[in-house]
Image (spheres, rainbow, N blue to C red):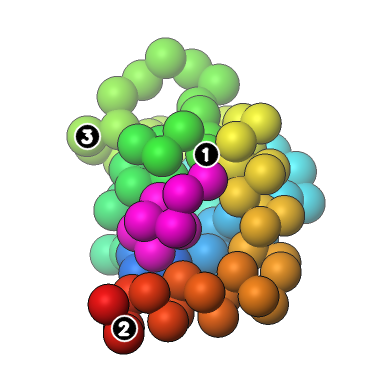
Amino acid sequence: MADDHLARVISCPGAVELLDELAIGPRRFAALRRTVPRRMLGPALRVLAAEGALRRQDAGSWDPCPGDDALIVLTGPGRQLVVELSDLDVWVAVYDRYFNG
């Protein structure tokens, strides 16, 4: 993923925490609410979905928050994003580009 995609994910409150949780395996929306506060969860889900990092098992919209039983799973690009974010050098490069231009 390009640095600007990583910066967009990193700068979204709750997105990295969601990726960490979903890296363990698919989660129901209700379980994700226990990991990420509700006010951050919807925006973080929408950012990650827009980046192609996750999807819903049902075909619902991301505009309203999914129902408690909606199953959220990482996609291939989402798993790759988790791998990239586990590398400290990636964090340093994104931080340097994001804050130092």
Can you tell which quarter of the image residue 19 is in? bottom right
Q: Is residue 96 visible?
A: yes
Q: Earlier in the sequence, mark 2 or mark 1?
A: 1
Residue 43 appears at what percent x and percent y? 29, 53
Left or right: residue 39 compared with residue 69? left
Judged from this view, the residue extending furthest toward the left is 63
| Residue in view at x 46 percent, y 71 percent | 94
The mark that comes first in sequence, 3 or 2, is 3
Which mark is drawn over residue 99? 2
Q: Residue furthest front?
A: 101
Q: Which residue is mark 1?
A: 53
Alpha carbon separation for disc pair 3 and 1 = 17 Å
Question: Is residue 76 left or right of 96 when viewed as pictured?
Answer: right
According to the image, label 3 marks what residue?
63
Q: Secondary structure at mark 1?
A: loop
Give whichever of 85, 92 is nearer the camera.
92
Is residue 30 visible in the rendered structure shown here?
Answer: no
- Element at label 2: helix
User: Identity of the amino acid at label 3?
Assistant: Asp
Q: Secondary structure at mark 3?
A: loop
Magenta stretch, main secondary structure, is: helix
Q: Is residue 47 above or below residue 12?
A: above
For discs 3 and 2, the disc positioned in front in the rendered view: 2
Q: Residue 90, position in %: x, y?
A: 60, 69
